[in-house]
Image (cartoon, helix red, strand yellow):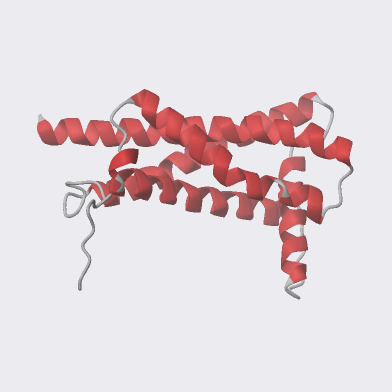
């Protein structure tokens, strides 16, 4: 006997309508803007605290190098690797968000509030596994971990808000243009 799905969770009207492509492009653009916003805030914050402005990228690069070393791959950590890795991860997560909100009915962004809320929720949930890596790989103390994780959670919350706002606005504008 063949079983049939009772409900297809993909967004109706998304197939063939260009909504998927629009969502992917908006996710990519929104992630770029969100990365720039949080990077500027992070760099300003670090300078304010008397630390090097590129310190956040160094942490990301050193963490990435530590992860690669677990697989026997020897790469230099530091700022350049951190910058590249940070943007690649951001682009990937932005594209996944854009795809999800155009393909799954429950995630369809029909208001700015929903876009911002889903962007925030998505980012905080997806960031948790990423954010626990630096303390583990770089062997931070408990006090260092607590201090930095709070800041990272705030920065990622801002990233999610920007992501959700841009993708939500872009998709709603595209829908209005098609209907109008």
Pick whichever, 126 or 77, lies toward us: 126
**Residue 141 at x, y = what percent?**
89, 43
Horizontal side of 42 relative to 166 (left or right) equals: right
Q: Residue at x 72, y 47 (%)?
A: 132
> Image quadrant for the C terminus?
top left
Q: Residue at x 78, y 24 (%)?
A: 48
**Residue 28 at x, y = what percent?**
42, 47
Horizontal side of 103 relative to 14 (left or right) equals: right
Q: Residue furthest front?
A: 1
Query: What is the number of callouts on the image?
Result: 0
> 64 above or below 34?
below
Q: Residue furthest left?
A: 180
Horizontal side of 30 relative to 57 (left or right) equals: left
Is residue 25 visible in the rendered structure shown here?
A: no
Q: Quadrant of residue 81?
A: bottom right
**Residue 39 at x, y = what percent?**
62, 36
Horizontal side of 53 relative to 24 (left or right) equals: right
Pick whichever, 34 or 120, lies toward us: 120
Q: Residue at x 43, y 39 (%)?
A: 30
> Image quadrant for the N terminus?
bottom left
């Amino acid at each position: 006997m063949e079983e049939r799905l009772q409900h297809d969770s993909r967004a109706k009207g998304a197939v063939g309508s260009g909504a998927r492509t629009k969502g992917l492009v908006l996710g990519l653009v929104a992630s770029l803007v969100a990365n720039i916003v949080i990077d500027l805030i992070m760099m300003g914050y670090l300078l304010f605290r008397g630390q090097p402005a590129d310190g956040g990228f160094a942490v990301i690069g050193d963490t990435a190098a530590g992860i690669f070393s677990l697989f026997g791959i020897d790469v230099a950590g530091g700022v350049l690797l951190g910058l590249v890795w940070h943007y690649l991860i951001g682009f990937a997560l932005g594209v996944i968000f854009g795809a999800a909100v155009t393909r799954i009915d429950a995630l369809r962004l029909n208001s700015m509030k929903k876009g911002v809320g889903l962007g925030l929720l998505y980012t905080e949930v997806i960031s948790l596994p990423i954010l626990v890596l630096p303390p583990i790989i770089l062997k931070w103390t408990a006090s260092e971990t607590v201090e930095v994780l709070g800041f990272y959670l705030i920065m990622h919350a801002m990233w999610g808000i920007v992501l959700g706002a841009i993708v939500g606005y872009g998709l709603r504008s595209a829908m209005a243009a098609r209907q109008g």
